[in-house]
Image (cartoon, helix red, strand yellow):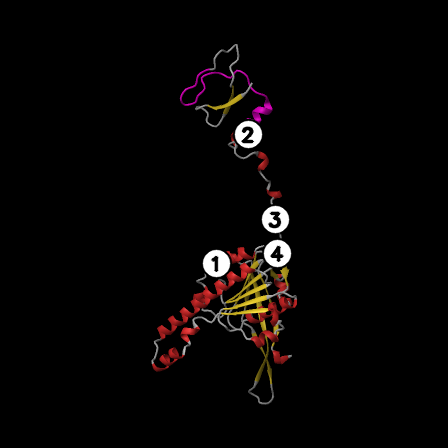
Amino acid sequence: MSSAVVSTSAAQGRPFLFDAEPNSHMGTAAPSTSSGQALGCPVERSSTARRDHILQSTIIGGKIPPASITPASQLHHCPAPEMAPSGIPAIDALTGGLPRGCLTEIYGPSSSGRTTLFLAALAAATRRGEFCVVVDASDALDPHSVAAAGVELDRLLWIRCDGDSQKENSPRRRRDTEKTSVPQDRIESRNMNQSEHRLEQVLRATDLLLESGGFGLIVLDLGDLPSQAARRIPLTTWFRFRRAIENKPTILLAIEQFPIAGSCSSLLLQLGLPSVEKNNLSRPTHAQLLTGLNISAELVRSRLDRKPARSITFATKTAWAG
């Protein structure tokens, strides 16, 4: 004997069980109206277990079996990313290091220690035997400072983005500029076009680097770009960069004046204006020698833990200060 589920119009959603095969003593099964309402009476009910199974299948629509529902306690947790030393012990104590397979943003104004931090990260990575890349958006990296920071130059790829230099720095362009006075608005427009062209080179180079792989640290130095140009990078680009390095041992480090990647960055670190340490010399009395900087660093956001924002201060030394 088989059973069928029929819903009456008087009580929608409340299933009733009827015998699909007529018994000998009942004769022909009762006809039904066009609305699906049964005119007969139930003859024999199924067993309790079978009724519960049909009711449960009816409640969930018969599409999702109960066995396929995973409890929240058994959901898969994403493993924490591997952390690599940044080269500065105070930063490692603050953030735990630089996360691999993630995007890290470091921002701050000029002379806030941005270059010091990413040169220390480059030095630490090359000492571990990793190959690194610096995508220099403004062609401002000093090779002597890089070597003085302890970076192994044979493991460093330096990509220089110089804008439309062939057109802007041509001898004919320079002669025309010297002979005629260029309005200020045209100069600003030209500088903005150069920044946009450099930014386009940065994004293209980064796409190729992330696609090729094999690098332990990729630094995007956007610190000297105008903030208006840097903010034009769409969030979809940062999302594409983040997806490209997932499950890879690559550290993507963006150096900026202001945070621009939004929620795509896993670690956001702000560097503040330093206080200057000076060594007063007796001869001559007006001379002051810069020996180091005290840099303040604040952990603004970290998706790796739920700890509140906190800050530290660390000191740097100049090359001539020993």
The residue identified by callout 1 is: 237
Q: Which numbered disc, 1 or 4, marks the residue that appears first in the sequence?
A: 4
Q: Which of 280 and 180 is in front in this view?
A: 180
Check contact, mark 4 vs mark 3: CB within 8 A. no
Secondary structure, mark 2, is helix
The residue identified by callout 3 is: 77
Q: Label 3 neighbourhood size at 10 Å, few (<14), some (14-19), many (20+)?
A: few
**What amino acid is found at the position of numbered circle 1 in the picture?**
Thr
Measured Cα–Cα span from mark 3 to mark 2: 30 Å
Q: Nearer the viewer, mark 1 or mark 4?
A: 1
Decide if residue 173 is on the left or right side of residue 97: left
Q: Quadrant of the N terminus?
A: top right
Q: Where is residue 76 in the image (x, y as percent from the top left)?
A: 61, 46
The residue identified by callout 4 is: 81
Residue at image location 41% in from the left, 72% down from the top: 191
Q: Which numbered disc, 3 or 2, marks the residue that appears first in the sequence?
A: 2
Q: Examine the rendering and report whether any part of residue 87 can be seen.
A: no
**What amino acid is found at the position of numbered circle 2 in the picture?**
Gln
**What amino acid is found at the position of numbered circle 3 in the picture?**
His
Q: Which numbered disc, 3 or 1, marks the residue that appears first in the sequence?
A: 3
Q: Examine the rendering and report whether any part of residue 315 can be seen.
A: yes
Residue at image location 58% in from the left, 77% down from the top: 144
Decide if residue 163 is on the left or right side of residue 180: right
The residue identified by callout 2 is: 56
Is residue 49 within the magenta segment?
yes
Measured Cα–Cα span from mark 4 to mark 3: 12 Å
Q: Give the range drawn in magenta.
A: 30-56
Secondary structure, mark 3, is loop
